[in-house]
Image (cartoon, rainbow, N blue to C red):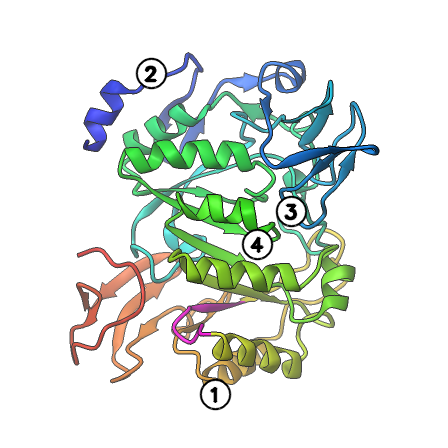
Amino acid sequence: MDKRQFLKTMAFGTGGFCFCNPGNIAAAVLSAPEVGKKWTKEALFYTTTPKGIRCLICPNECDIKEGEAGDCHNRINKNGKLYSIAYGNPCAIHIDPIEKKPLNHFFPGSKAFSIATAGCNLACLNCQNWSISQKSPTETKNYDLMPDKVVESCIENKCESIAYTYSEPITFYEYTHDTSVLARQAGIKNVLVSAGYINKEPLLKFCKVTDAANIDLKSFSDEIYLKLNAGKLQPILDTLITLKKEGVWLEITNLVVPSWTDDLEMIKKMCGWLAKNGFTETPLHFSRFQPLYKLTQLPPTPVNILMAARDIAVKEGLKYVYVGNVPGAGNENTLCPKCSKLLVERRGYSIIQNNLSKGKCNFCQSPVAGVWQN
């Protein structure tokens, strides 16, 4: 079934979602009572305990009492069942270049229909989207956009993929999953932009409908994960291995935060682990920190630290290493790992030239890891 046939056969809802143009997206606003009552769906992956409901979606495994929410702010215990109040009510809707996710080796130059709801299962001090990630859906301005309408809107705006992004798609798991199922039926790709803090069983279910993922590997230290992000390192490493094993195209981002994650010896250990565990062809994006949220007292990451991190990664055997949030100098260009010729030239999020054909270098015909448009 092609995309237009899918549109004709899908049963659309009555929400007032419309587009004036790709840069001006409007949708029907939901009130807080609607978010709390109408737009609920029973959650997946939970069990009951003497302390209440235990959510099993992520390593936090919150024990949630009647009427309360878990750490992610949007999974609540209601009458002895766990519900997602994020289902169908995104607080952010945008059309983005796929390079913004960032994904450099997945359909370069294509557009992603990006959605997010409020909530996150981590609490990063440096969060750039804290105004939605550290809120409940009852506290944000939300829109009426059920899964079928997400797919319809993606098709109408000629986007090749849907990106579940900005906050944490793990916390709006059911919404992400159900939308992904419909997207697959319509021939649309699904992109997960996540911190990767998820238990294995729900991750495996995601893998069946996810085409690509960018995972934030925030540091290579349990102590830093706890103090900076309120999480643990090992679950993220497990997520990376599972995604690779299940055939999901994967790229990794490491935000280099001054005085927190800018230790070059720790970065070397991280890159060594990636190389040892089969990620030499997985793109790694070192991203520049900007003072935000609870770390406004820190300076932006020095560019020389980012370049040093890239050099370390290359020496450890990683073939595709990028530096993000530093304009110019070709930091986001893709080079052939064999002949070193320029393959994909980028300026910001725009593709200037593409010297790939069917996933091979036009100059030496060597294959280049990725998911490329023919």
> Which quarter shows the N terminus?
top left
Distance from the alpha carbon under mark 2 to that under mark 1: 53 Å
Q: Quadrant of residue 152?
A: top left
Distance from the alpha carbon under mark 1 to that under mark 3: 34 Å
Marks 1, 3: nearer the viewer = 3
Q: Earlier in the sequence, mark 2 or mark 4?
A: 2
Where residue 240 appears, as percent x and y from the top left, is: 51, 62
Q: Residues within 10 Å of mark 1 (few under 14, many from 20)?
A: few
Distance from the alpha carbon under mark 1 to that under mark 4: 26 Å
Q: Earlier in the sequence, mark 2 or mark 1?
A: 2
Residue span colored magenta: 278-286
> Is 279 part of what is drawn in magenta?
yes
Examine the rendering and report whether any part of residue 121 can be seen: yes
> Is 153 part of what is drawn in magenta?
no
Distance from the alpha carbon under mark 3 to that under mark 4: 9 Å
- Please report the residue visible at 24 percent of the width from the left and 26 percent of the height from the top: 6
- Please report the residue visible at 66 percent of the width from the left and 52 percent of the height from the top: 127
Q: Are marks 2 and 1 in contact (CB under 8 Å)?
A: no
Disc 2 secondary structure class: loop
Q: Residues within 10 Å of mark 4 (few under 14, many from 20)?
A: many
Q: Earlier in the sequence, mark 1 or mark 4?
A: 4
| Residue to which mark 1 is pinned | 315
| Residue to which mark 4 is pinned | 196
| Residue type pointed to by label 3 | Cys
Q: Residues within 10 Å of mark 2 (few under 14, many from 20)?
A: few
| Residue to which mark 3 is pinned | 58
Q: Earlier in the sequence, mark 3 or mark 4?
A: 3
In this rendered view, identify the residue nearer to me: 98 or 62. 62
| Residue to which mark 2 is pinned | 11
| Residue type pointed to by label 1 | Lys
In this rendered view, identify the residue nearer to me: 52 or 163. 52
